[in-house]
Amino acid sequence: TQLLEQSPQFLSIQEGENLTVYCNSSSVFSSLQWYRQEPGEGPVLLVTVVTGGEVKKLKRLTFQFGDARKDSSLHITAAQPGDTGLYLCAGAGAGGTSYGKLTFGQGTILTVHP
Amino acid sequence: EAQVTQNPRYLITVTGKKLTVTCSQNMNHEYMSWYRQDPGLGLRQIYYSMNVEVTDKGDVPEGYKVSRKEKRNFPLILESPSPNQTSLYFCASSSGTDRWEQYFGPGTRLTVT
C-alpha cells in the first residue's frame, strides 16, 4: 500500500502571510495532483505535475514535484480569505500492482483570517 | 456540461439493508473510481475501473462491490451495510493515461444505523 503523508493537517493564518503544504512518500508516483475541496462539494483539480523537479505556478500558488517523484509541495504567497479550504494531494501509482491506484494525503484545512 | 453525477446525495439506512449508489459521467472517460472520505483520513480508494468489465480493488474494498457494464456508469453496491461504512462517498472519472486527473461527483453522504 502506498502512503502519502500530508502536513500540516491544519493551518490558520492571517491574510497576507505565506504558507507551504507538504506531501511526502517513500513511493514513486507517475504523477501528483493537488485538489481543493469546499464544504459539501467534491474535490476540484488545481494542478498536475508529472516530471521530477517540475514547478508549476497558478497565480499566487506554486507547486513543485520532487526530483525523485516521491514528494510535492504547495506554496501560497500572500494568502487571501478566498484561499480558505481543504487542500489535498494525490499520487498516481507508477506501475505494476499500483498502476491505476490513486493515493490521497490526509488533507490540509487552511483558514485565512481577514 | 461535463460532469459526474451521483445519486442519492444523502442516504440513511439500517444495518444489513442492501443499497446501491449510482455514478454516471458524460465525458467518455475510460477510468472511474470510488472513494470514501473520513475525517483525518483523507480520501481512500475503494474500487477503480480501467474500462468496461475491468475493475480492481483499491485500498479499502472490504464490504463493497462494483460493476462496470457500460462506460458511463459505475455503481457502488453495499450488500450488507454496517455502521463502519458511514462515510462521505465520492465517485470520480478520468481519461487516465499518465496524468490520472480525477473529476469528482458531488458526493453521497451515507449513514448506516
Image: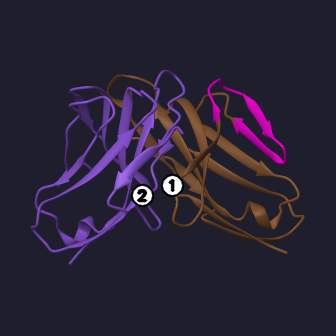
Chain colours: A brown, B purple
**Can residue A109 be found in the magenta stretch?**
no
Q: Chain of mark 1?
A: A
> Would you say the residues marked 2 and 1 are in contact, meaning their CB atoms lie under 8 Å apart?
yes
Please give the residue where the numbered disc 2 appears in the rendered image.
B107
**Can residue A62 be found in the magenta stretch?**
yes
State the separation of the CA atoms marked 2 and 1: 6 Å
Q: Chain of mark 2?
A: B
**Residue ID at (61%, 39%):** A71
Residue B113 screen position, x and y as percent: 20, 78
Task: Name which residue type carries label 2.
Answer: Gly
Residue B62 screen position, x and y as percent: 19, 52
**Residue ID at (31%, 29%):** B71
Please give the residue where the numbered disc 1 appears in the rendered image.
A42
Residue B76 screen position, x and y as percent: 24, 49
Q: Residue furthest bottom?
A: B113
B97 to the left or right of B80: right
The image quarter containing residue B89 is bottom left
Dot 1 lies on which element? loop
Above or below — where is A25 with respect to B52?
below
Q: Which residues are magenta?
A: A48-64
